[in-house]
Structure formats: structure tokens, C-alpha cells
Image (cartoon, helix red, strand yellow):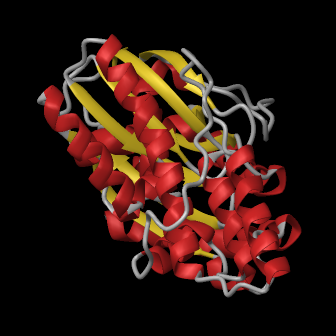
Amino acid sequence: MSYKDKIKDKDQDIYILALESSCDETAASVNKNGLEILSNVVSSQVDLHKKFGGVVPEIASRKHLELLLPVIDQALAEAGVEFEDLDAVASTYGPGLVGGLLVTLTAAKTISLALNIPLIGVNHIAGHIYANFIANPEIEKPLICLTISGGHTDLLYFEDLRGYQILGRTIDDAAGEAFDKISRFLGLGYPGGPAIEKAARSGDRDAIDFPRADLGDSYDFSFSGLKTAVMNHVHNEEQRGNEIDQNDLAASFQEAVVDSLASNLIKAVREYKVESVVISGGVAANQRLREVIAERLKEHNLELYYPPLELCTDNAAMIGAVAYYQYLEQDFAPLSISADPSLKL
């Protein structure tokens, strides 16, 4: 019997096993009706990659292979669900590191074929956005969403949950990528976002006036020039024999990134009539970013929504949330689906 004969409607409980391995986290979750998380297991490789100053794709892929089956078993056990109870299996298929993507995508294909249940391919960035709806189901539409991660900086306008317009995105380095590169340049460690944020707490954010990219009326972002300005500042100070306060440097750099992100977001809020504003992705965990945006939203009588830390970083629960709505639309993937490391929204 084709699995299409077993598709449930939204009035029935739908259980989805979701898998995620686009970077250096191996994750599995079981979602009930999309936003109810029965389990969310994440095994991070951060400590493994720290000594290299960033993620080594080959090492990450091999670790995913080692960890995936135990992570799936744990997710099912914590949810109190058997394979036979599943209505669908979902996996990230992009964007991300192709070796990592292939691990969970291949596993999801196998489970789909063995259990004769639908396979759902999910965009990783969409997952970060939907993490907000897991944590804050009261969010009203239309809304503006700023999604900021290691490889992506996207400003989106949502008319409803499944329809959006891309207002702007980075034209070079993403915000998270800039954090990683400057952290590595300063010797602060990996991952760069938390390392910069920690140093910035003891620094003066007004110590150095780093540039903010001016792209005119565009909602696009650019951090390449800021990254170059930080490096030039350090080189110039070293040539003059001046001592460099890394905390002041980190705080001033972070402030420039935050100001650029917040300014474009507020510009969009002024133009579009929205009920909610949300931020998502790993960089959304930055406390200074949350503070600045929340403060600037007060004049518009809007509250800022963001996921808790465990849903900001890569996880499978957010993938399961997107997959549920794709399930209702019968937006299923063929077994021939391929990993797409450059997948766009």
C-alpha cells in the first residue's frame, strides 16, 4: 500500500521523527502536531573542533555517522514512541556542509523506505524561523523575522505562517561568519559569537567607532568592510606599538554588528505594518542584540520574540516543526532528493 493512503489530516495526532546534521550538531527529535516537542536530543561537536578554530567538514561527517543511531534511539525512547508510531520522517537537506547533510538525509530515506512513511526535506533556515513558533505560539502575523546564523543573515516579511517575502540578506559575510572570523583573528576561540560576547562584557562598546555599511535604501547587510576595519585597526595599533584592549575591541565590533542588524530591522518595521517581530538563528542568542532591538521596538509598541538558547542553536525540533506544516500540505520529498549545501529560502 502506498503511504499516500495513510496520510492523516490536521484533526489527527501526527508524529514526526526529525533529523539534523547540517554542521557540527547531530540531532533528532520527535514532534507531535508540529509544535509539541516530545524529545529533542542534540549531540554537539564544539569541543572536538575548537582546536582547529572552526568546523572541519570531514571530521564532522565522520562524527555524525558515529552518533546518529544512538541519538535517534534516545529521541524515540524519551518520546515514548516506537518506529511503528511514526507518520513521517524529516531531515534537513540544505543549506550546510554536504557531508553532514548526507548522513541524516540518507538515514531519513532509509527509514521512509523501511516504514513506508513520507519523507520530508526541510530547509535548515526555515527551521530556525519556526523555532520561534515552538517557543512562542502566541506570535501574531504579519511579522518581520531577522534570521542570523553562521552562514546566513536574512530579513523576512511573513504575511502568514507559510508565506514570506525576502526583504534583504547579506551580500558578503554573514553576521555569524564575521563573529567567527574576528574571534579567530583575535585568538578568542571558537565558536566566535559566544567568545566575542564574553569578551565584550568587560569592554567599552564606544571605545572604537567601527563603520556600519551604508547600502542606501536596501535592506541588505554587509559585514566584510567591518571585518577589514577591525583587522586594519589592530595592524595599525601594533605598528605604532600601542597596547590593544581586546575587550574594548570585541565590544566595539559587536556593537557595530548589532547596530547594523537592528537598524535594518527597525527600518523594515517602519515600512511594514506588523503585529510581531522575531529573531532566529544562532546569533539570536546574543544578549546585546536582544537588548538593542527590544529597546528600539518600544517606540513602535512591539515586543521582540526569540527562541530559548536550546532552540537558537542547531536542533531537530525546529526541523520537525517545519515538517509538520509540509506534511499537512503533502509537500513530500522523493527518495531521489539530494543534499543541497547552498539551498536558499
Residue 97 lies, in percent from the top left, at 78, 52
Q: Position of residue 281 (x, y in %)?
A: 48, 49
Q: Position of residue 16 (x, y in %)?
A: 43, 44
Instruction: From the viewer's perspective, tell me whether residue 229 is left or right of residue 278.
Output: right
Quadrant of residue 275 in the image?
Answer: top left
Vertical placement of residue 336 versus 103, above or below: above
Residue 171 appears in the rendering:
yes
Q: How many marks?
A: 0
Res. 331 in view: no
As drawn, the residue found furthest toward the front would be: 240
Q: Is residue 66 left or right of residue 44?
A: right
* Viewer-closest of 5 and 254: 254
Q: Is residue 119 left or right of residue 172?
A: left
Quarter of the image with the N terminus in it: top right
Direction from residue 9 to residue 85 in the image, left or right: right
Residue at 26% over, 36% down: 13
Q: Residue at coordinates 63% horizontally, 61% vertically from top-left?
A: 179
Query: Residue sitting at 70 percent across and 66 percent down?
Result: 182
Q: Residue 332 lies in what quarter of the image?
A: top right
From this view, report whether residue 114 is shown above or below residue 8: below
Q: Nearer the viewer, residue 230 or 75?
A: 230
The residue sitting at the left extreme is: 301
Where the C terminus falls, by quadrant? Answer: top right
- Residue 277: image quadrant is top left
The residue sitting at 30% across, 23% down in the picture is 143
